[in-house]
Amino acid sequence: MSPPSAVPPNRTSNGDTKPSTVAPLEPGLSESKAKVQMPKFPGPPTFTDKYAERDYLKGRLAAAFRIFGKYGYDEGVAGHITVRDPVQPDTFWVNPLGVAFSLIKKSDLIQVDHEGSVIDGGEVRLLNAAAFMIHGAVHGARPDVVCAAHSHSIYGRAFCSLGRKLDMITQDSCSFYNDHVLYESFNGIVLAEKEGKDIAACLGDKKAALLQNHGLLTAGNTIEAAVFWFISLEKCCQAQLAADAAAGGRGHETVKIHDDDAAFTYKAIGTPKAGWFSAKPLFDVIEKECGGEYLQ
């Protein structure tokens, strides 16, 4: 495979030249300088008290719903975000069916066990059966997944009707380079345990799935990462729909990013920590706009 075209060759001690792939996006940039220029991301808070961690995560989950509501990811009562409970890891917290994303508070969330029973939570204890089938299967199959997010966002469901994965045509799409899958089936609303498990099996160890004729699903080791991956994937779908239409109208195709460059970019912006940190502005803004009201 040929190296990225923007990278000048290195000269060896015997005078021969060989291509450099140290920093393909920045010609002439050494590895040491690249490390200096890329700051280290901070990380999510850590807890010794699991109950304090639960309370914190429930607050972040409520904020996540406010973000989804702000972006218009609600469609009637469809859509759900779950977080694994740190006290009882075989259970998760989710939004109650029928409560608007933009109104959800921490006290509204409901706790669901591995059998689909609501064991704790707010006054409204209606559980979306599809939320349990999909998210229960993902949490069960992936111990590393703390949060999973799914909704019927407009560009995501439009793109999912095409039955294809993302092309690497933008820097942002590289976050999903070799890290998303296409679930090539649609059997109506996910009410069967088998389909939930099939979706989880298709997701495998990836962070995102395009559910054909349905919508987007993302997973992360933090709430923030799962939320950011969902928002970014939705925008990547929007960008590709627009780019494909524009290119097709001229009888052309979009320009694809070289595999080497996509892999290099993924290492910078596609990691779990990058996902967590990228969501920070979203959560900061929603806290400012809501005045922390969702923490009630």
Image (cartoon, grey):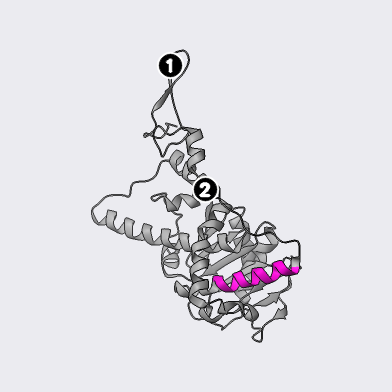
Report the residue that reaches farthest toward the top: 14
Callout 1: SS = loop
- Identify the residue under disc 1: 16
Front tag of 2 and 1: 1
- Identify the residue under disc 2: 178
Residue 112, x across and y down, in percent: 70, 74
User: Which comes sooner in the sequence, label 2 or label 1?
Assistant: 1
Mark 1: few/some/many CA within 10 Å (<14, 14-19, 20+): few
Is residue 99 located in the magenta-colored stretch of the structure?
A: no
User: Which residue is located at x 66 percent, y 87 percent?
Assistant: 123
62, above or below 176, in the image? below
Residue 73, x across and y down, in percent: 47, 72
- In this view, the residue in front, 37 or 207, is 37
User: Which residue is located at x 56 percent, y 72 percent?
Assistant: 63
The secondary structure that dominates the magenta segment is: helix
- In this view, the residue in front, 190 or 1, is 1
Please report the bounds of the magenta region as a residue range.
51-64
Report the residue that reaches farthest toward the bottom: 123
- In this view, the residue in front, 52 or 133, is 52
Residue 29, x across and y down, in percent: 43, 34
- In this view, the residue in front, 6 or 130, is 6
102, above or below 151, in the image? below
Report the residue that reaches farthest toward the left: 250
176, above or below 198, in the image? above
Callout 2: SS = loop
- Which quadrant of the rendered structure holds the N terminus? top left
Instruction: Give the Cα separation between the discs numbered 2 and 1.
Output: 34 Å
User: Which residue is located at x 66 percent, y 72 percent?
Assistant: 93
> Any mark on residue 129, and which?
none
Amino acid under label 2? Asn
